[in-house]
Amino acid sequence: MDKPILSKQAFWDVDMDSIDYEKNALFVMESVINSGSLEDFRSIKRFYGDKKIAKTIINTKELGPKEVNFCCHVFKLKLQDFIYPIKKHSPALSADYYGA
């Protein structure tokens, strides 16, 4: 199968030609869900399929609450399906980052 066509938006720090889309499936999924475009998301859905994404993404440690809820909605998952605790965003860190 041809590799998915993805923008640099989610992979700005990676040589996209060196990505092994099968070995690094979780990394690809996390990157697209966290930072990719809607077209990137559609592309990984076509490439991996909903079943594989749902089965793989529950092993993530890298998605925040918003992204996990999105995955739950799209892939018919429950929060309890995720193996690791959901990353919490630190309000103090956010306030410092935005200068509040």
Image (tube, grey):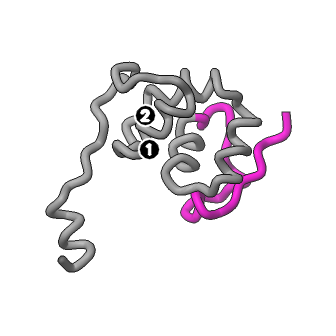
Q: Which of the two residues, 95 or 17, is positioned nearer the viewer here?
A: 95
Number of other residues with Cα within 10 Å of mark 2, as a class: few under 14, some 14 to 19, many 20 or more: some
Instruction: Assess whether residue 22 is covered by the magenta stretch.
Output: yes
Residue carrying label 2: 60
Q: Quadrant of the N terminus?
A: top right
* Rendered location of residue 26, percent (x, y): 54, 35
Mark 1 belongs to which amino acid?
A: Glu
Q: Which residue is depicted at the point 64% across and 21% down?
A: 51
Task: From the top left corner, tell me how far across and down residue 46 is, in percent.
Answer: 76, 36
Q: CA distance from mark 2 to mark 1?
A: 11 Å
Which residue bears the numbered disc 1?
67
What's drawn in magenta, residue-wise? 1-25
Main SS of the magenta part reads loop
Asked whether the residues under the numbered discs 2 and 1 touch, taking CB atoms below 8 Å apart as contact, a structural biologist would say no
- The quadrant of the rendering that contains the C terminus is bottom left
Residue drawn at x 70%, y 28% is: 49
Measured along the vertical axis of the image, is residue 43 above or below residue 95?
A: above
